[in-house]
Amino acid sequence: MARTVAMFTDISLCIGCRACQVACKQWNQLEPEEPEWTGTYQNHAHFTDKTYRLVRFFEEPADDKVGMRWHMMSDVCKHCAQAGCLEACPTGAIYRTEYGTVNINQDICNGCRYCVSACPFGVVSFNHDTGTATKCTFCNDRLHNGLGPACAKACPTESIRFGFRDELEAKARKRLEDLKTMGYKDAQLYGADQGGPLGGLNAFFLLLGKPAKYGLPEQPKLPQRNVVLDSLFSIGAAVAVGLGALLAFRGRGDDGDGGR
Amino acid sequence: MEPGLLKSSDWPLLIDLYFFLGGVAGGAFVIATIANLVDGRRYQDIVRIGYYVAFLALLPCPLLLIVDLGYPSRFLHMLMVSKPSTAIGMDAMTVGPFHLKVFSPMSAGAWALLAFGLCTFLCALDVFLTDRGGRGVTGLRTVAGLIGGVFGFFIAAYPGVLLGASARPLFVNAHWLGAIFLAVGAATGGAAIALILALLRGAGAREGLARVMRVTSMALVLELIALVLFVVSVKMAGSAGISAALGQLLAGAYSVPFWLGAVFIGVVVPLVLQRGAARAGAPGMAALVSVLVLVGGFLVKYVLIAAGQAS
């Protein structure tokens, strides 16, 4: 297995130019889509089967309480170390690459769509044209040729950075410290910690506020964590039904007239 | 996360129908097996009807699932691919071209459906041969019945566990969906047997009817308990998005089919009516109650899935 790679998206550097979004579309040959009005410059509202990188725009009152300020965050598949989509996939189409990223083999996916609802971030999308599930591939083809993902390559402010996970995490921590000393008290890393939720995210973020502000779950949960307990409760119910039925059929026939 | 940013699988009514029929098949099969174990001769009508119901209810299921796939010709990928990767999950097991992922309820369910389908076929075949005056295959009904009984429970319950292992706000912290689905499967399976028994045998089947109806009532009580525990477990999770999702089910867009359809018509009315019917074993009443249980059983699954997908 090659060394795990990662993307680090530092939203304090994002200028909302969407070069990443365009580069992603170009490299992955994703068709154009009708724009939609989302209330901001953001297009589209969500990840789609043709939008793997999505610059989210958030508006909030500025510090002076007079104007407004933007938060721009280039969002992408998190390539979770414990990935809900991957664990849900019944065909094995979703797999962990040798780089530690999560990819969907389009030749195997049969379009059951279970991964779509299993993603804690709403990333995976169903493509009605191909009948398969799609999402960011971490530019798997580029990785194999020694290149980083197209979005990171295109980013003019180095808001999106690509590298080996351990090195990138160290850079992210340094950047966080710098921002804190510059007065950004609420700055925090999201998904950088490999001991954190989902075993860490291989696409992690530096946020300037709480995750909820950016539409991210505070404590994302691997849905498959439910399976053991749910199964135990189901087995309990099965034992109850089984015993009850056994008693119902064993007892003397005093409820009807057949036993007399 | 903002619940609106999460995505739904958008499974259509076909899948609800599969979950319902799978539950009926699983429940009817288990009841037939237990009746057969206790006294196969005395309960031969229940056993015969139960195994036939299980077979017939399961027959359209694979088709429903395959038609819903985005790429139907790849349905076999649920079980096998030419070269399965080992990096497909924390628990992935592969043997040759076959693969099984224990923590993916859909993967486990695909295998269980295959095994259960085989057992329902064998039991229905044995019943058929016996009905035609043959002796049947010695021990086949017992062995296939026992193995199939385990898979029958599985087929009834796993859709609930499958829904629970998703990120939908209504389901992500819910733990009782599998138990609800199992209880509904047993209730609807019993109701299907009772309905056919009442229609075919009428007053001649009083004792059998009374006993099957007792199993059905018990399953309904279990369903009610599991539903309460489900609501409590979701409520305890407590985030805004999850509470809103629960509100949609209990007091919002889905409250009428939930309370009136699933709970009142599907559980409360049958339980009240059945007390009388159980004493009398009256075929007319048993048939009516069975129809209500079947309708309610479909509705409870439908409304849980709809509310979950919309949450």
Image: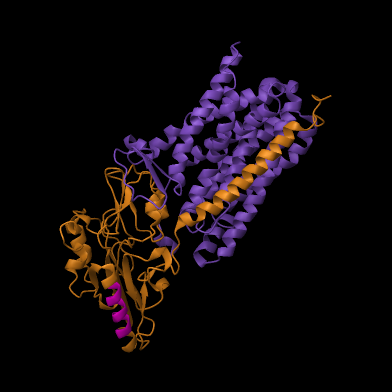
Q: Position of residue B187 (x, y in %)?
A: 64, 38
Q: Camera-side residue: A104 or B217? A: A104
What range is drawn magenta here? A168-178
Give the mark count. 0
Image: A27 above or below B51: below
The residue lying at 67 percent from left, 43 percent from top is A240
The residue lying at 27 percent from left, 72 percent from top is A168
The residue lying at 21 percent from left, 60 percent from top is A24
Left or right: B308, with B220 as reference point: left
Dominant secondary-structure state across the stretch colored magenta: helix
Image: B220 above or below B52: below
Q: In the figure, residue A52 lies in which quadrant?
A: bottom left
Q: Position of residue A82 (x, y in %)?
A: 39, 59
Query: In the rendered image, what is the letter of the chain coloured purple?
Result: B
Q: Camera-side residue: B24 or A244? A: A244
Q: Colour of chain A?
A: orange
Image: A160 above or below B26: below
Left or right: A37, with A231 as reference point: left
Q: Is residue A169 magenta?
A: yes
Q: Position of residue B159 (x, y in %)?
A: 51, 44
Image: A245 above or below B310: above
Q: Position of residue B289 (x, y in %)?
A: 69, 35
